[in-house]
Image (cartoon, rainbow, N blue to C red):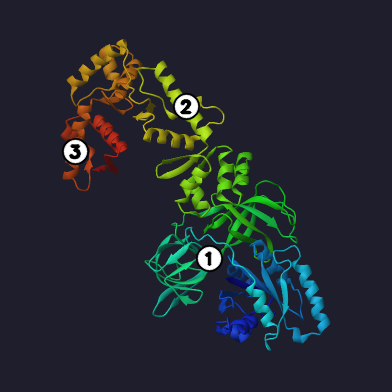
Amino acid sequence: MIVATAGHVDHGKTTLIRTLTGVDTDRLAIEKQRGLSIELGFAYWNAVSGERYGFIDVPGHARFLPTMAAGVGGIDAALLVVAADDGVMPQTREHLDVLDFLGVSQGVVALSKGDLVPEDRIDSVISDIEAALAGSGLAGADIIPVDSLSGRGFDNLRTALSTLQPKARQTEAPARLSIDRSFILKGVGLVVTGTLLSGKIAIGDTLTVSPAGLDARVRGLHAQDEKVEAAQAGQRCAVNLTGPDIDTDTVRRGYWLVANGGASRTTRIDTEIRLGEDSPILKRRDLPVTLHIGAAKTVARLVLLDSKTLGPGETALAQLITDEPVDAVFNDRFVLRDHAGARTIAGGRVITPFGAARGRAKPDRLQQLAARRKDKALDALRALLGIPPFHVDMTAFCAERNLLPSASRELIESAGAIGITHDGKQHAINTEYWDRWKDCIAGTISAYHERHPHLPGCTEADFRKTFPGDGPGRDLLKVLLGNLRDTGIIGYRNGVYCLPGFSPSLTKEDEVIWRQAEARFEQAGPQAPTVHELAKELAIEPEKLGTVLDRAAALGSIVHISRNRYLLPKTVTDFEKVASSLGEEYSEGFPVTAFRDQAGIGRNLAIDALEYFDRQGFTTRHGNLRTTR
């Protein structure tokens, strides 16, 4: 159970935690000297129920609100402290706004310093507190008068705290720990602390520091201030990390420890935001703001997506474009302050960390965001499959929702979708559209073969011409064709698609021309003529000869190596042997002249052949030299 304090400066938060737990959370000398919390403090308390409570004591001064925001991300509940002599103050209200924006929906209010005021003043302050809490996530919270010096009221406070319930956490999910402290401990090394928001971590695990992208191994672990072998979501942890480049310069507050390799690292986040009740109307389309998410703070630009203006208390879809990469997943809560960081203006939650750079406010994109807003992953997947493009990249979807890759198959089956895998990524496709698109692809190829029996097949461009208006986009078409090819439903050769077992045939006229050309190529040996040279010899139009040679190339009878040159397969093989020999002879790479001389050909043909080998990946060019692969 993780509880964070909140409240105005000098209202007694740190003293209250010390009385409750016996721990002074002011660790710094300057904090003790000034009697003012500057950094986050931590303490633990065992409730009668056996539940171990972790307390995060936050600064109350307005200048340290970023530190406060870093401490309350991911907590289970809040302990709001209001001094009876001051009552509800500006930072009381701003801290309440921050808690509300971060989705904190339970807590207790401690009314401190009651010994300094008459009894009727306490009743008045309680009324003010109830009014301030109205409409917030803490509405109806218990308000407990306490005296930190005498201990009066603390039994009631402990009872009220014991009724709070930990939030539901993703335990079977990739681990995500929000780092709020990073320091070197003598004899131990780098230690980071934070709340484990999802998953589990154990000694020996290798995690990623995101967004830095560094790998770190867990060498030691404490959970809820106790040494453990493993920790789970909902616990505060201190993690001893080791690894190359792992130090306080590369691992700092605002970073994350994640188990998915930083798959959700982003600079463009689609969100749902709510403007504060006291905030001015937002009219700008590109508003600079300060973003607090997890324990991170960064500058961002806010772009409204589904409205031109946003009034106090209103909700809208918006995109945040951050100056620095951040790690974010669905439903992560955040706070927005003005560009100067002087006042809190809004807050909200992440819909997807994979915001669109183009077309972000188009109707189809807004329709997709509306589907992605659904809390349950299965509901969101079903909604997405029912709207264009009727397809979901499940690799990205699982990263967006912080789900284990193994969850993908179950979600696809539960949604009644078709699951296909291509290039290492899994995709879910609406069953109705999958059948329709598959039939359209097969039909397009079949019709093409009937019209052009002498050609090897059709290209992606041919498919795009035949699909109806709700056909797959360019990227999805590649996935569909790749899957149909991988599963043997269609064939693929030299960049074109055909039906399995199909082989193009030359027309009688083409056959006559090809036999003449083939004889000339065999006679020429390595000194193959260009298309124009051969067309002149055979008294054929170059365009006509080129068409016949292309058809012969589709049959594998000849190889098209450049715009104006073809080679017999045997000649290509001979040239490959020459290049391989030179690759062994010249360790730093061989020049064109060496290839030309050993192959016994002219410079132009040598260049055409080597550039063909470059495209095939057989050779690699380094300036004027080439190496073989």
552, above or below 508, in the image: below
**Is tag 2's residue or tag 1's residue first in the polypeptide sequence?**
1
**Is tag 1's residue or tag 3's residue first in the polypeptide sequence?**
1
- Tag 3–tag 2 contact (CB < 8 Å): no
**Number of other residues with Cα within 10 Å of mark 2, as a class: few under 14, some 14 to 19, many 20 or more:** few
Q: Which mark is residue 296?
A: none
Residue at 52% from the left image edge and 54% from the top image edge: 266
Rendering quarter of residue 358:
top right
Q: Which mark is residue 439?
A: 2
Closer mark to the observer between disc 1 and disc 3:
1
In the rendered image, is residue 179 in sight? no
Q: Which mark is residue 254?
A: 1
Closer mark to the observer between disc 3 and disc 2:
2
Q: x, y percentage for residue 578? A: 18, 36
Q: x, y percentage for residue 468? A: 54, 27
SS label for mark 1: loop
Label 3 belongs to which residue? 594
Q: Amino acid at mark 2?
A: Asp
Rendering quarter of residue 81:
bottom right
